[in-house]
Image (spheres, rainbow, N blue to C red):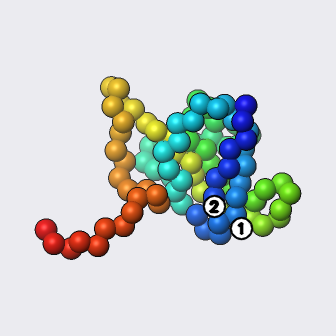
Amino acid sequence: MVSVTYTCPYCDAVVEIDRDPYLRDKSVTKDPKGDREYASTTGDYESADGIEFVCIGRADADDGCGRTFYLNYVKYDEGREVDEGPSLEDTPRFDFNP
């Protein structure tokens, strides 16, 4: 197990979880994506499609906002990665020409 941290998209607090070192993270979003099945941080999150976090910050710093956000794992269909649209990590585009 390794300790992995994620940043809350609402308040920038850092949350931490111990999990398998094999990482298949895709994105962190404010809202759940499509038909994904999310597990809580105390559930079986390795077999889910992602993790539902409640922002409480780190154990050593009480700086969380209490809002819910989602870690989405990479999802595959017939061996190919499923494109589920933009995420918070995508760079915005401002070219309005067709």
Residue 24's place in the image compared with 6, above or below, is: above
For label 1, the residue is 65
Residue 28's place in the image compared with 36, above or below, is: below
Helix, strand or loop for disc 2: loop
CB contact under 8 Å: marks 1 and 2? yes
Query: Which residue is more in the foreground, 70 or 58?
Result: 58
**Looking at the figure, which quarter contains the C terminus?**
bottom left
Q: Amino acid at mark 1?
A: Cys
Few, some or many residues within 10 Å of mark 1 (<14, 14–19, 20+):
some
- Give how far apart the Cα atoms at labels 1 and 2 are: 9 Å
Helix, strand or loop for disc 1: loop
Closer to the chain start, of discs 1 and 2, is 2
Few, some or many residues within 10 Å of mark 2 (<14, 14–19, 20+):
many
Q: Residue furthest top?
A: 78
Occupied quadrant, residue 46: top right
For label 2, the residue is 8
What is the x, y in percent for residue 77? 35, 30
Occupied quadrant, residue 86: bottom left
**Looking at the figure, which quarter contains the N terminus?**
top right
Q: Amino acid at mark 2?
A: Cys
**Is any atom of residue 48 visible in this view?**
yes
Q: Residue at x 52, y 45 (%)?
A: 72
